[in-house]
Each structure stands twice: as C-alpha cells, then as structure tokens.
Amino acid sequence: MDAVPRYLISFPEGAMTFPDEDLPAVAEAAHAVVREAKAAGVWVFGGGLLEHGEATTVGTDGSVSNGPYPGTTSFVGGFSIMDVPTRDEAEEWAARIAAACRCAQEVREVMYDPEV
C-alpha cells in the first residue's frame, strides 16, 4: 500500500494582522476548520506557536542557546499537518485555513519516511 502524502500548511509569525477584538471570531473560525479536517479524517496535528523569542536552539554538540536558529529572518507562527492524497486537496484545506485565519498559508509536502 502506498502512503498518503502529508502536507505542512503554515503561516509566518506576524501574518495575522486583524484587530485584537476579532481574535475570538478568528479562533472560532480556525477551530471550525480543524473540526472539519478531523471529521474528514485528514487532520494529523497542528497549532499556533509562541513568539520566536521563546525559542531555543540546540546544537549538534547538545549545547543550548536562547533564540531561533542563527540568521533566521522568518519564523513559523502556526501550522497544520494534513494527510491528503494530492497537493490540490492540501491547497483546498490551506484555502479554508487562510480564510479562517485571515492570512495566506504556505503548502509544502513532507518527505516520505517509511519509519514514520
């Protein structure tokens, strides 16, 4: 059996630029899309990320430093992982998320790994 592709749907930190008073409506719209994706059986995992100022970077030697990866200029603000058979379907879900979150979404296929 061939594996169904997984897609990362994400948006950069700071992309959600609506007024603070709109947050409850945006949150409800986003949660509604998540519920639809779960009901459709395509939702794997996702969520919003705290600001990059809370990030740490762990080096290959195990050392830990405050902040994101050095030289990073764009930071992920939130993401969803979806199991869908085609990029077109991933883009359809991304469109729903974009409308709910009021910001554009990036779609990238996750490389297949037979161990996962």
Image (spheres, grey):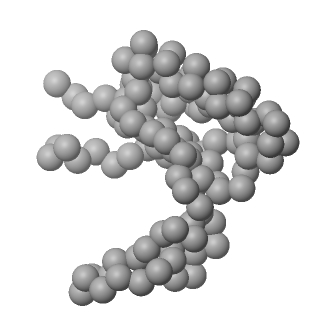
Q: Is residue 96 visible?
A: no
Locate residue 108 relative to residue 22 in the image: left or right. Answer: left
Which residue occupies 38% across, 46% down? 110
Please state the total of marks drawn on the protein image. 0
Which residue occupies 48% across, 69% down? 55
Locate residue 84 relative to residue 75 in the image: left or right. Answer: left
In the image, residue 75 lies at what x, y percent?
A: 59, 63
Q: Quadrant of residue 22?
A: top right
Q: Is residue 115 above or below residue 68?
A: above
In the image, residue 16 lies at what x, y percent?
A: 73, 46
In the image, residue 42 lies at what x, y percent?
A: 40, 23
In the rendered image, the quadrant that contains the C terminus is top left
Which residue occupies 84% across, 42% down? 19
Q: Is residue 88 above or below residue 75?
A: above
In the image, residue 106 lies at what x, y percent?
A: 60, 45
Q: Nearer the viewer, residue 22 or 75?
A: 22
Q: Nearer the viewer, residue 41 or 23?
A: 23
Q: Nearer the viewer, residue 35 or 19?
A: 19
Q: Is residue 88 above or below residue 113?
A: above
Which residue occupies 42% across, 13% down? 39
Q: Is residue 62 above or below residue 10?
A: below
Q: Quadrant of residue 99?
A: top right
Q: Is residue 10 visible?
A: yes
Q: Nearer the viewer, residue 53 or 92?
A: 53
Locate residue 80 relative to residue 18 in the image: left or right. Answer: left
Locate residue 4 relative to residue 30 in the image: left or right. Answer: left
In the rendered image, the quadrant that contains the N terminus is top left
